[in-house]
């Protein structure tokens, strides 16, 4: 899986309304750098000319995935040289000086894909990725390598709509990087197990009066620790997660049973039908009655 049998390099055309999709792919490729050879070995256009000594600045993002060997990376925001090993994903940012190269004793195998657009701009703006943390040690993943190979295969044919297809694959790679990073933070299986137990308890008791304090006590946890770790791991508080589950259960009851709105509201322990309807409309944009009519 770590072998690249043929160096590939594509700079891609962008059609009339491709930019409207929210993300476009500018380049994709792969190359194998044997030990003690010049880097980079392939010819790039002026906008991508690169020497490790001088570095470069892009007007796009790139995801560079090292799957074999090791080397070094530095950037405007990460001035001290960082060690890069197999399984590292490097995210390069537009307008950010950077430089990287393989160790001459090992060489390396790399995949890359360049892209730009509002979708990735918004993810950076909202803090999902940052220039200060461009290196992501996600491990060598055959599924991510397959995604790069899919982009290369589709880009080579340039069929109608290929930009929309390959740019969506780039978003899938970004999602995988984010997912692996988030879960790598939680190597303590005790925390993960307790949060999963809590989620099961919330789901299984959605029509009961069991409180979040009761759940924490049942799991042998202090409530403050439980609430903090739950939000840190899931992104929402236990109370918000419980409301999400209540909404899902309400939608299920509205579409699969003949229970009236009052029965559903009280079975989910809302204080009143009015409170339930207000909550439902705020989340769904329509009332429970309207939701039921549309569903049928």
Image (spheres, helix red, strand yellow):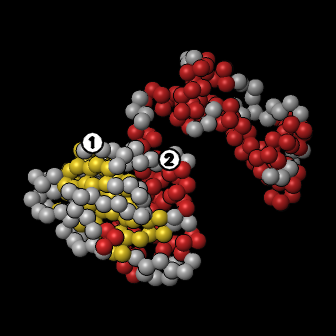
Q: Residues within 10 Å of mark 1 (few under 14, many from 20)?
A: few
In the picture provided, is 285 more to the left or to the right than 202? right
Could you tell me which residue is drawn at 38 percent across and 55 percent down?
A: 96
Q: Are marks 2 and 1 in contact (CB under 8 Å)?
A: no
Q: Residues within 10 Å of mark 2 (few under 14, many from 20)?
A: few
Helix or strand or loop: what does disc 1 sit on?
A: loop
**Considering only order in the chain, which callout, 1 or 2, is on the residue closer to the N terminus?**
1
Q: How far, Cα to Cα, is label 2 from label 1?
A: 23 Å
What residue appears at the point 36 percent right and 75 percent down from the top-left corner?
A: 11
Residue annotated with mark 1: 80
**Foreground residue, 172 or 136?**
136
Q: Position of residue 232 (x, y in %)?
A: 54, 33
Q: Residue at x 45, y 26 (%)?
A: 190
Judging depth in this view, the residue of 20 and 174 nearest the camera is 20
Q: Is residue 31 left or right of residue 278?
A: left
Residue 260 pos. (x, y %): 90, 44
Q: Position of residue 220 (x, y in %)?
A: 55, 17
Residue assigned mark 2? 128
Picture layout, residue 239 above or below residue 9 = above
**In the depicted structure, whether residue 68 falls above or below residue 83:** below
* Relative height, residue 115 to residue 292 (above, below): below
């Amino acid at each position: 899986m770590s072998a690249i049998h043929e160096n590939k390099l594509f700079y891609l055309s962008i059609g009339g309304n491709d930019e409207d999709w929210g993300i476009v792919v500018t380049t994709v490729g792969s190359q194998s750098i044997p030990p003690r050879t010049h880097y980079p070995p392939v010819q790039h256009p002026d906008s991508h000319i690169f020497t490790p000594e001088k570095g470069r600045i892009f007007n796009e993002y790139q995801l560079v995935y090292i799957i074999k060997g090791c080397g070094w990376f530095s950037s405007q925001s990460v001035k001290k040289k960082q060690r890069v090993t197999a399984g590292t994903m490097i995210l390069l940012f537009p307008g950010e000086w950077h430089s990287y190269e393989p160790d001459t004793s090992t060489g390396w195998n790399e995949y890359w894909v360049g892209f730009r657009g509002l979708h990735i701009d918004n993810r950076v703006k909202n803090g999902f990725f940052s220039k200060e943390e461009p290196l992501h040690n996600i491990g060598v993943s055959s599924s991510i390598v397959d995604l790069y190979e899919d982009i290369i295969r589709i880009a080579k044919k340039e069929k109608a709509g290929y930009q929309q297809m390959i740019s969506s694959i780039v978003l899938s790679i970004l999602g995988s990087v984010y997912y692996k990073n988030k879960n790598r933070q939680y190597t303590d299986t005790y925390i993960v197990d307790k949060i999963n137990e809590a989620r099961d308890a919330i789901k299984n008791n959605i029509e009961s009066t069991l409180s979040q304090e009761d759940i924490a006590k049942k799991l042998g946890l202090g409530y403050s620790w439980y609430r903090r770790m739950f939000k840190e791991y899931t992104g929402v508080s236990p109370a918000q997660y419980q409301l999400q589950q209540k909404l899902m259960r309400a939608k299920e009851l509205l579409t699969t049973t003949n229970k009236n709105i009052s029965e559903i509201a009280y079975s989910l322990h809302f204080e009143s039908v009015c409170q339930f309807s207000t909550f439902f409309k705020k989340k769904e944009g329509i009332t429970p009655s309207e939701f039921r009519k549309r569903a049928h």
